[in-house]
Amino acid sequence: MAGIDPSSLVRICPKTLTDADWQKKKGKIGKLVKTGVGAELKKLQALMKRIDVGLLDPAASPSSSYSDLAEKVKAAKAEYSKNVQPMQKQCYIVRDKAAEAEKILRKKPLGGSAAKAAAAVSKAADHYGVSCKSLDLDARIATAKSAIDRKNMIAKKFLGGSLQKFVAGAKAFKSTPTMDSWESNIKQQGRSVSNSIKQLEAYNKQFWKDFEKFKGFDRNTLKIADQANFDAKAAIIVKMAVSQVKAIAAFKPQ
């Protein structure tokens, strides 16, 4: 696939390929002659409405990882096969039907304008059919990969510092184990570690399943928002997190 941004496929469909435009431009003579063009245009528009351009474009929404992107590429190809290819086939049906209509209308008295309108439909359908098989999926994949690479670079850059800040925050929290201390020494530091671990594929695979259990170090989610639960659980949670953070710091991805 090369040439057309998948997200623009529906948007670039010319107005000429609508039944409303055809009815308007074929004029009175065209209305007196049964050509079947309008019916085929309606079928084309109905097929177009089935297309999910969000699925068709793997870069339409951010991908967190290459595996996430791979799933979106798979979905894009499936959407293309399921809904774009039938529409492309219909384009050529419209093209041929309109070309046939042009020949018929040219033979009719005062049928020149209607024939011209039919020729325009035929040409537009042919061109749009080419567009349907010219989607530049590779360019959108490259865009998505670049975004993932930037996220990975940032996560890798800040991981070491985030780990150090969490250990330091945990030490400060241990000396003053209060809710305020949690907010200033644990919450954001823990989230920074979480963000990097979740983003970096090797770390994600090795640690995320366990580190995710800290729920972004949100006290409500961890059910330590009230004083009694906080006193009973907060120190234990921090100790467990520090243990994991040290393991993360010692980890050497292949």
Image (spheres, rainbow, N blue to C red):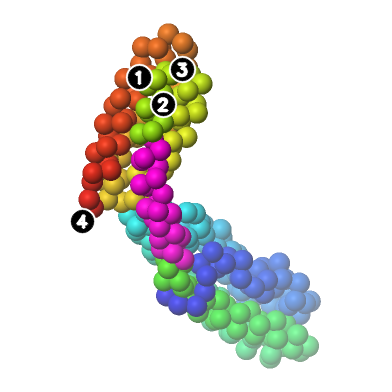
Q: Is residue 123 magenta?
A: no
Magenta stretch: helix, strand or loop mostly: helix
Asked whether the viewer can see residue 79, the reply is: no
Going 35% across and 25% down the picture, which residue do you hit? 238
| 97 relative to 169 in the view: left or right | right
Residue 180 percent location from the top left of the image: 51, 21
Question: Is there CB contact under 8 Å for labels 3 and 4?
Answer: no
- Which disc is residue 235 wearing? 1
Camera-side residue of 246 and 194: 246
Q: Earlier in the sequence, mark 3 or mark 4?
A: 3
Answer few, some or many: residues within 10 Å of disc 2's Cα (few below 14, many 20 plus, some between 14 and 19). some
Q: Earlier in the sequence, mark 4 or mark 1?
A: 1
Q: Earlier in the sequence, mark 4 or mark 2?
A: 2
State the CA–CA distance, disc 1 to disc 3.
10 Å
Disc 2, SS: helix
Answer few, some or many: residues within 10 Å of disc 1's Cα (few below 14, many 20 plus, some between 14 and 19). some
- Which disc is residue 254 wearing? 4
Answer few, some or many: residues within 10 Å of disc 3's Cα (few below 14, many 20 plus, some between 14 and 19). some
The residue under label 3 is: 178
Going 39% across and 45% down the picture, which residue do you hit? 161
Question: Is there CB contact under 8 Å for labels 1 and 3?
Answer: no
Disc 1, SS: helix
Circle 1: residue type: Ala
Going 45% across and 29% down the picture, which residue do you hit? 185
Disc 3, SS: loop
Residue 54 percent location from the top left of the image: 51, 56
| 27 relative to 106 in the view: left or right | right
Disc 4, SS: loop
| 139 relative to 9 in the view: left or right | left
